[in-house]
Image: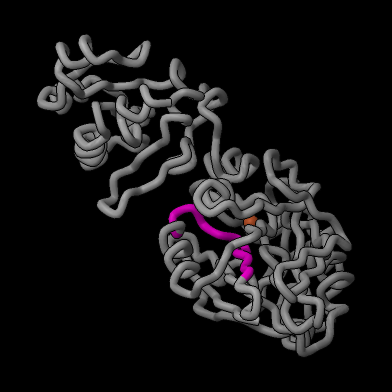
């Protein structure tokens, strides 16, 4: 089995790539949306086909890459049935099995950090991917998202510490530069749940951690309950996720793009700016509801716009609108994308 530990330095998140080397079938555990290009590049370099993305739970600190990876490479999104998430392809529960190539993962329900937390264990019990249930000399927190110290204590003791002592633990995060541990090591050395700590002692520790709320919780959790993609129709009211608001794909030049299908689904709910000259837009046809603001005047017009508001740029072929999208991004607009292929693609559809 090929196994790679990948790191997102902004949220201290580990993503794991597992692959069957004979068949080339691969899975990613806990992919981070901001690392999408890195992960896709690695898969293609290694000649692997991503069949599943597995979320150990609905994360509070980052947005999952599962939904966008499904759009980009056709992988199936997997998450625990008790997570409350919608739109995944496979919902797993305690005892579920996942197969890719010759590799089988068993699912163990390990609630406590959240209700829907699961641990993925290879069939040979050599590797366990514990998400935020068990860390190296630590555990996930239990003070939000249905957290329960009692349940986490039971999950760790019944579902993780029952594995062989030499099972390698691959955690969802580490904040001290450590990379992996073993069941035996944590049973002896984990200051919260190891070394004979009782459930009451664990609960007492967890009740007195006084941790700050994760920065991205208000945007990450709603997005992660939809595979990391928030439909535009549900965008009013709550703050929008910085990246998860649309199915953005970046060109090699870094231009954020959405497909004409996405624009068709979301038109009416978002600001659409047609950057062609007015006579061109009139004679060649335009999408209902667009504002025609020629390329040279967008900078000036955008001064009146809210930088948090989603904006889609449109032109004839997608070239000018792509340049404008990049420019607006530099000006601080957070939710900006160009319609790929422009009106040529729109009209041919
Ligand atoms: Fe978490």
Instruction: Say whether residue 211 is left or right of residue 145.
Output: left
Outermost left residue: 296
Residue 295 lies in quadrant: top left
Residue located at (65% from left, 80% from top): 22
Tell me residue 294's x, y (percent).
Answer: 15, 21
- Is 71 situated above or below 293? below
Say which quadrant the N terminus sits in. Answer: bottom right
- Is 132 situated above or below 138? above
Q: Nearer the viewer, residue 168 or 134?
A: 168
- Is 298 situated above or below 268? below
Residue located at (26% from left, 21% from top): 274
Tell me residue 229's x, y (percent).
Answer: 54, 40
Outermost front residue: 348
Residue 336 shows in the view: no
- Which residues are the magenta region? 25-35
Could you tell me how many numbered marks the image carries?
0
Q: Quadrant of ligand 1?
A: bottom right
Q: Name the image colouring.
A: one colour
Q: Nearer the viewer, residue 46 or 131?
A: 46
Residue 270 lies in quadrant: top left
């Amino acid at each position: 089995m090929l196994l790679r530990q990948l790191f997102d330095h902004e949220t201290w998140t580990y993503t794991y790539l597992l692959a069957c080397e004979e068949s080339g079938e691969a899975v990613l555990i806990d992919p981070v949306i901001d690392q999408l290009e890195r992960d896709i590049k690695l898969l293609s370099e290694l000649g692997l086909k991503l069949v599943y993305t597995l979320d150990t739970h609905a994360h509070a600190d980052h947005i999952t890459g599962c939904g966008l990876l499904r759009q980009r490479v056709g992988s199936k999104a997997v998450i625990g049935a008790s997570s409350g998430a919608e739109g995944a392809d496979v919902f797993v529960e305690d005892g579920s099995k996942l197969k890719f190539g010759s590799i089988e993962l068993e699912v163990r329900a390990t609630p406590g950090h959240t209700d829907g937390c699961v641990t993925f264990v290879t069939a040979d019990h050599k590797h366990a991917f514990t998400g935020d249930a068990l860390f190296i000399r630590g555990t996930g927190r239990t003070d939000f998202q249905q957290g329960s110290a009692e349940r986490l204590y039971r999950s760790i003791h019944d579902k993780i510490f029952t594995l062989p002592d030499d099972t390698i633990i691959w955690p969802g995060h580490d904040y001290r530069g450590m990379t992996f541990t073993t069941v035996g090591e944590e049973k002896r050395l984990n200051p919260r749940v190891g070394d004979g700590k009782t459930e009451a002692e664990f609960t007492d520790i967890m009740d007195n951690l006084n941790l700050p709320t994760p920065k991205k919780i208000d945007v990450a959790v709603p997005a992660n309950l939809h595979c990391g993609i928030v439909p535009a129709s549900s965008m009013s009211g709550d703050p929008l996720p910085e990246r998860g608001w649309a199915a953005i794909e970046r060109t090699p030049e870094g231009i954020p793009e959405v497909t004409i299908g996405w624009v068709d689904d979301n038109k009416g709910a978002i600001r659409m700016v047609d950057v062609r000259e007015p006579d061109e837009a009139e004679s060649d046809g335009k999408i209902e509801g667009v504002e025609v603001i020629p390329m040279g005047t967008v900078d000036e017009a955008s001064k009146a716009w809210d930088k948090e508001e989603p904006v889609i740029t449109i032109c004839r072929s997608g070239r000018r609108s792509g340049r404008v999208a990049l420019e607006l991004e530099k000006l601080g607009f957070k939710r900006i994308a160009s319609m790929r292929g422009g009106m040529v693609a729109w009209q041919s559809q």
